[in-house]
Image: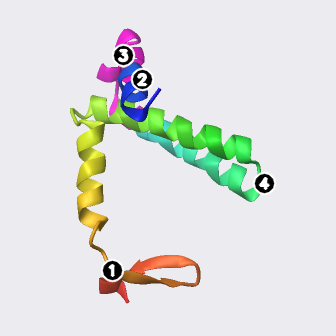
Amino acid sequence: MNLIDLTEHIEQWAIDRKLNNADPHKQVLKLGEEFGELCQGIVKNNPIQVSDSIGDMYVVLVILSMQLGLNMEDCVEQAYEEIKDRKGKMVNGIYVKESDL
C-alpha cells in the first residue's frame, strides 16, 4: 500500500472510532508521548522502536489534522514548498538555514 492509501485507511479508522471529532489537545499529548518513544528508540539504538514510533507519530498527525479540519497532504505540501529552495549548511551535524547563519 502507498502512503496515500494508508492515510485514507487511517482516516477511516479514526472516523469509525469517532477520533476525528475528539479533543485535539489530547491528540497533541499523544504526539508528545510518541515522540518520547522515538527519542528512547534512538538513544537505545532500537531500530524497531524507532520505526514503530515514526509510524505512530504519522498516525497521530493524520488524526490531529482531521480534528483541526486540515488535510495532511496539504500540510506536507505547504512544508515542502517552504523548504524546497532553502539554502544553508551543516553545522555540528545539524542543517541550519541560511537566514539563521
Q: Name the residue rendered at 27%, 46% in the picture.
A: 75
Q: Is residue 33 at all visible to an observer of this figure?
A: no
Q: What is the span of residues highlighted in magenta in the rendered image?
A: 11-27
Where does residue 85 sit, x and y in percent of width and height? 27, 72
Going by the numbered disc 4, the residue's amino acid type is Lys
Q: CA distance from mark 3 to mark 4?
A: 34 Å
Numbered disc in front, either 4 or 1: 1
Going by the numbered disc 1, the residue's amino acid type is Lys
Q: Name the residue rendered at 50%, 40% in the picture.
A: 57
Q: Looking at the image, is mark 3 or mark 4 earlier in the sequence?
A: 3
Query: Mark 2: few, some, or many residues within 10 Å (few <14, many ≥20)?
Result: some
Q: Looking at the image, is mark 2 or mark 1 earlier in the sequence?
A: 2
Using residue 69 as the reference point, say whether residue 9 is left or right of it: right
Q: CA distance from mark 4 to mark 1?
A: 32 Å
Query: Mark 3: few, some, or many residues within 10 Å (few <14, many ≥20)?
Result: some
Q: CA distance from mark 3 to mark 1?
A: 38 Å
Q: Is residue 98 at all visible to an observer of this figure?
A: yes
Q: Is residue 24 magenta?
A: yes
Residue 9 vertical position relative to residue 61 in the rendered view, above or below: above
Q: Looking at the image, is mark 3 or mark 1 earlier in the sequence?
A: 3
Where does residue 9 sit, x and y in percent of width and height? 41, 20
Where does residue 81 sit, x and y in percent of width and height? 23, 60
Label 3 sits on residue: 12
Q: Looking at the image, is mark 4 or mark 1 earlier in the sequence?
A: 4
Point out which mark residue 87 bears: 1
Q: Pointers 4 and 1 in contact (CB under 8 A)?
A: no
Label 2 sits on residue: 10
Numbered disc in front, either 2 or 1: 1
Q: Pointers 2 and 3 in contact (CB under 8 A)?
A: yes
Label 4 sits on residue: 44
Query: Mark 1: few, some, or many residues within 10 Å (few <14, many ≥20)?
Result: few
